[in-house]
Image (tube, rainbow, N blue to C red):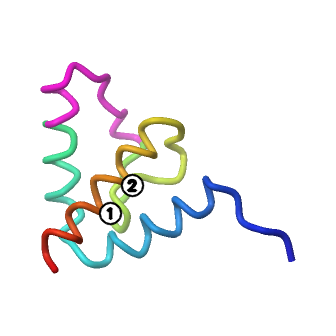
């Protein structure tokens, strides 16, 4: 069995954390924060009702979303 890549690990964390919060509300807050910071918005075609975004987002967007959900989960605990 091969070891998971960092991308696969992040996708697993996102899927797990998305089940612990209101992912739609978190996605809206995340997008508002991104706009406030002057970051490009993520195309709505990448939206997913279960995890916030489909696994088609990559790079910094994936990293930021992973961290955002982790923070949201930590705030609830």
In the figure, residue 30 lies in which quadrant?
top left
- Residue 10 belongs to magenta span: no
Which numbered marker is on residue 62? none
Q: Quadrant of the N terminus?
A: bottom right
User: Is 64 positioned to the left or the right of 10 in the image?
Assistant: left
x 13%, y 75%: residue: 76
Task: Please name the residue that numbered disc 2 is placed on.
Answer: 66
Categorize mark 2 by other alpha carbons within 10 Å: few (<14), some (14-19), many (20+): some
Residue assigned mark 1: 49
Badge 1 marks a residue whose secondary structure is loop
Instruction: Please provide percent x and percent y for residue 64.
Output: 36, 44
| Vertical placement of residue 6 versus 42, above or below | below
Using the image as rendered, state which of residue 54 and residue 77 is in the foreground.
77
Q: Quadrant of the C terminus?
A: bottom left
> Which is more foreground, mark 2 or mark 1?
2
14 relative position to 3: left or right: left
Closer to the chain start, of discs 2 and 1, is: 1
Magenta-drawn segment:
33-45
Res. 22 image quadrant? bottom left
| Residue at disc 2, secondary structure | helix
Residue drawn at x 16%, y 48% as measured from the top left? 28
Q: How many marks?
A: 2
Residue 33, placed above or below residue 7: above
- Residue at the farthest top position: 38
Q: Nearer the viewer, residue 24 or 10?
A: 10
Residue 34 among those drawn in magenta = yes
Q: Position of residue 23 (x, y in %)?
A: 24, 64
58 displayed left or right of 27: right
Tell me which residue sits at (54%, 45%) in the image: 56
């Amino acid at each position: 069995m091969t070891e998971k890549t960092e991308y696969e690990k992040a996708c697993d964390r996102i899927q797990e954390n998305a089940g612990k919060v209101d992912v739609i509300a978190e996605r809206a807050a995340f997008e508002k924060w991104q706009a406030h910071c002057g970051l490009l918005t993520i195309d709505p075609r990448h939206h997913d009702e279960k995890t916030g975004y489909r696994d088609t987002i990559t790079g910094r967007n994936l990293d930021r979303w992973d961290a955002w959900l982790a923070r949201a989960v930590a705030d609830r605990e």
